[in-house]
């Protein structure tokens, strides 16, 4: 692909470069932080664009079953590089060899929901796709950290972990990171403060059984629950009906899918922040999908969102969170539901 992209410079390069500079040392090309995005659709390209726009990666590879799309997107992104201010290597191919030695592989390949579908309806199709994609990824990048976006992302993270044979800390489902971001934004609108000044988590499944942790929602350490002890309960007990915020978080992707066919920008921004945490070892706390290993009494072998420290090794720690008994019960039920779905999968 590089030949196609640089055909003129490939022809003229050797003569011209000798006139421009003199070689002092023979360079060995080595990528410190290649990020590969598998699945160059709406989500894959929003992730790729965010990675570039936020200046997070300097070596980006796009892989998709549709070779022409990879090449088209590669060329299109490269044509903006003169205005970007940094040098970035961009490659694109349907051959996974192009992704070799990636530090991070973001998996977005697969089917997306139609208007009347739930995320869980995608299991069959997307497990089949992962069975072909994940072995190829691992063949060329055996030490990669996988970020699983493809829905249902908790289930697909478990599938990617099983097929890849990677240690669990190297497989991260994006989980309720997007739900939590939507939650923070909606609370911030009600309170009239910036979204990043609202500290709030949604945990559990990235889906209908997600759990809003009202007991810890706070602004500058002031817990909303201390001001409204019934926050998040039914409208008879909580006249401000804060539970509607969670209901909106659960329903809004369906509304966006009805309006534009898919969601992509929010998740794209989140993927690039996750990559940043890994590439720069930021040890940022994010609610992402991982194995709970007994966290809050969850012993099922599932991937489910809980607050984790994300850094250069992937997920290094799980944060102990004091949940109220109803929150604890709800996340345990969410885990049991995910496990029931996993039990139907044949790998
Ligand atoms: N976890 C989250 O928060 C979110 C997850 N998603 C999920 O992300 C996934 C992708 O969504 P979109 O980008 O909108 O879909 P899309 O249809 O625009 O793109 C999917 C891409 O996957 C590629 N693909 C399909 N099979 C493949 C294979 N075997 N090998 C390589 N590439 C293959 C297709 O060619 C296509 O380019 C869906 O499962 C969607 O539900 C979407 C938004 C948020
Ligand atoms: C599609 C999806 O999972 C979301 O936007 O939340």
Image: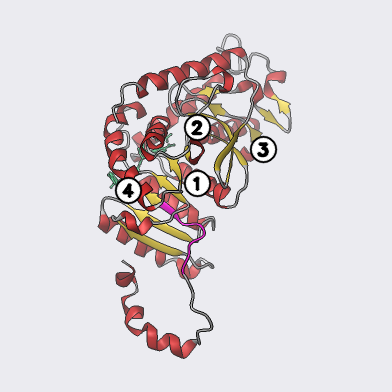
Q: Is residue 30 magenta?
A: yes
Q: Badge 1 local density, few (<14 within 10 Å), some, or many (20+)?
A: many
Relative to 187, does residue 339 appear above or below in the rendering? above
Q: Residue 49: image x %, image y %?
A: 45, 54
Give whichever of discs 2 and 1 has the lower sequence position: 1
Give whichever of discs 4 and 1 has the lower sequence position: 4
Tell me if residue 194 can be seen: no
Tell me if residue 213 can be seen: yes
Measure how far apart labels 2 and 3 are at the Cα level: 26 Å
Label 4 belongs to which residue? Answer: 136
Q: Residue 142: image x %, image y %?
A: 42, 49
Give whichever of discs 3 and 4 has the lower sequence position: 4
Of helix, strand and loop, which mostly describes the magenta segment?
loop
Q: Badge 2 local density, few (<14 within 10 Å), some, or many (20+)?
A: many
Query: Disc 2 or disc 3, which is closer to the eye?
Result: 2
Residues rendered magenta in the picture? 29-36
Label 2 belongs to which residue? Answer: 290
Relative to 164, does residue 221 appear above or below in the rendering? above
Label 1 belongs to which residue? Answer: 269
The verdict on label 2 being within 8 Å of ligand 1 is no
Give whichever of discs 4 and 2 has the lower sequence position: 4
Q: Secondary structure at mark 4?
A: helix
């Amino acid at each position: 692909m590089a030949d196609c992209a640089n055909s003129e410079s490939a022809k003229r390069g050797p003569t011209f470069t000798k006139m421009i500079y003199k070689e002092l040392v023979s360079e060995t090309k080595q990528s410190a932080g290649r990020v590969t995005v598998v699945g160059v659709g709406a989500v894959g390209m929003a992730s790729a664009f965010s990675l570039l726009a936020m200046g997070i990666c300097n070596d980006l590879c796009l892989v998709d079953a549709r070779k022409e799309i990879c090449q088209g997107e590669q060329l299109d992104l490269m044509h903006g590089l003169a205005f970007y201010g940094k040098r970035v290597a961009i490659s694109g191919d349907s051959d996974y060899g192009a992704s070799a030695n990636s530090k991070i592989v973001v998996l977005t390949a697969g089917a997306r929901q139609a208007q009347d579908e739930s995320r869980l309806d995608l299991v069959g199709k997307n497990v089949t796709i992962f069975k072909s994609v994940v072995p190829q990824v691992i063949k060329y990048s055996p030490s990669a950290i996988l970020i699983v976006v493809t829905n249902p992302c908790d289930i697909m993270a478990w599938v990617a972990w099983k097929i890849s044979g990677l240690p669990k800390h190297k497989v991260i489902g994006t989980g309720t990171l997007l739900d939590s971001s939507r939650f923070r934004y909606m609370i911030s609108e009600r309170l009239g403060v910036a979204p990043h000044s609202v500290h709030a988590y949604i945990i559990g499944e990235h889906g209908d059984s997600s759990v809003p942790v009202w007991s810890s929602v706070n602004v500058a350490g002031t817990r909303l629950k201390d001001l409204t002890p019934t926050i998040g309960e039914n409208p008879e007990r909580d006249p401000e009906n804060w539970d509607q915020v969670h209901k909106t978080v659960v329903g809004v992707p369906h509304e966006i899918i009805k309006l534009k066919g898919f969601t992509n920008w929010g998740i794209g921004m989140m993927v690039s922040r996750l990559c940043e945490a890994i590439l720069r070892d930021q040890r940022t706390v994010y609610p992402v999908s991982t194995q709970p290993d007994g966290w809050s009494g969850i012993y099922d072998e599932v991937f489910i969102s809980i607050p984790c420290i994300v850094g250069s090794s992937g997920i290094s720690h799980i944060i102990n969170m004091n949940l109220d008994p109803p929150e604890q019960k709800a996340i345990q039920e969410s885990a049991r539901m995910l496990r029931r779905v996993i039990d139907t999968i044949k790998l």
